[in-house]
Amino acid sequence: MKMTKTKLFIVITLAVLVIGFVLFGVLGLNNTVDYRNAYQIEITADANVQDTMETVKTVSDDYFAKAGVKAQGFAFQQTDSKLIYKFATDISSIDCGALKTEIETALNSTSNVEVFASTSQTITDNQIGWICLACGLAILASFVYILIMEKLAGAVSVIASSILSAVLFLAVMGITRIPAQPFVMASLLLSVGLTAILSSVIVNRCNEALKNVGNDKSTYVKIAEDMTNQSTFRIIVSLSVLALAAIALLAVAPVYVKFAGLQLIVAGLVAGFVSVGYTGLVWAKVRALYKGKKSRIATEKDEEV
């Protein structure tokens, strides 16, 4: 039996949700060493000799390599007299005393060197609660606005798509293991907002098509499918602009902003997928329910999912 486009969307969605939330439940979001419990080595030295810290870094890097541990390069910090290395894995193989001796030997005892090992503290994002509240208020405001402008079917379609977008975004983040913090909540909001906008475009087209006497004998499903197809090019153009912005971030931005660029790509793909796959379907089903299913059924085939 040939799988319809709608069934294909549903199968893909269910697969992503199941795999994504299994990984999410087991591993959580993939946070970097700056946003989870990790380990760090802090090295201080009197920078009273030219190139002191360069020598300290060279010796330290070689020592870590011999110890079989690898620091997270993007989280490395350096000042005029201090180096801070951060590690995602256990650093029990590092002997701070031995490292200090090697550094002092390389510096010919010209500097006072100190080496400390510790557990780095997790950075807590105190804005998450407010962002979630803002997301909920935005969805509520969108529902009220679209309910007024596009009626019940349009409002339900946009809100359902927006909620699915949020859930699917988290599932994809769980699968791809893209580092989450500090931008994940902003990217989640972007995915929800972009889905609402794209879905509103499709809903508006569907409602306008209903006014066309040429569609009097068309089913709601057929109208939704046609209007979604007509909106696809506009959606692709919109998402292409977002993709170009994300690529620009990946090319020139600092590491953490590169992670934001990857999240932008995920947000755009999820928003496009949900809008095209589900907005029209929900609109058609809700419209048929409260307007009377028989009023817009030309053939049974059009109403197949």
Image (spheres, helix red, strand yellow):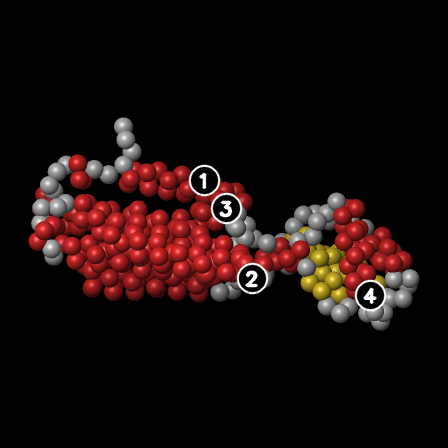
- First in sequence, mark 2 or 1: give its number: 1
- Amino acid type for the residue under numbered disc 3: Thr
Question: Does 147 sit left or right of 132 as displayed?
Answer: left
Real-space Cα separation, disc 3 to disc 2, in angstroms: 22 Å
- Amino acid type for the residue under numbered disc 2: Val
Query: Is the residue marked by circle 3 packed among few (<14), some (14-19), or many (20+) residues within 10 Å?
Result: some
Image quadrant occupied by the C terminus: top left
Pair 4/3: label in front: 4
* Residue 55 visible, this angle: yes
Real-space Cα separation, disc 4 to disc 3, in angstroms: 41 Å
Question: Does 36 sit left or right of 139 as displayed?
Answer: right
* Residue 39 visible, this angle: no
Which mark, by number, is residue 19? Answer: 1
Element under label 3? helix
Which mark, by number, is residue 176? Answer: 3
Residue 149, located in which quarter of the rendered image? bottom left
Write down the residue under mark 2. 252
Residue 271: x and y in percent read 37, 53
- Amino acid type for the residue under numbered disc 1: Ile
Query: Is the residue marked by circle 2 packed among few (<14), some (14-19), or many (20+) residues within 10 Å?
Result: few
Element under label 4? helix
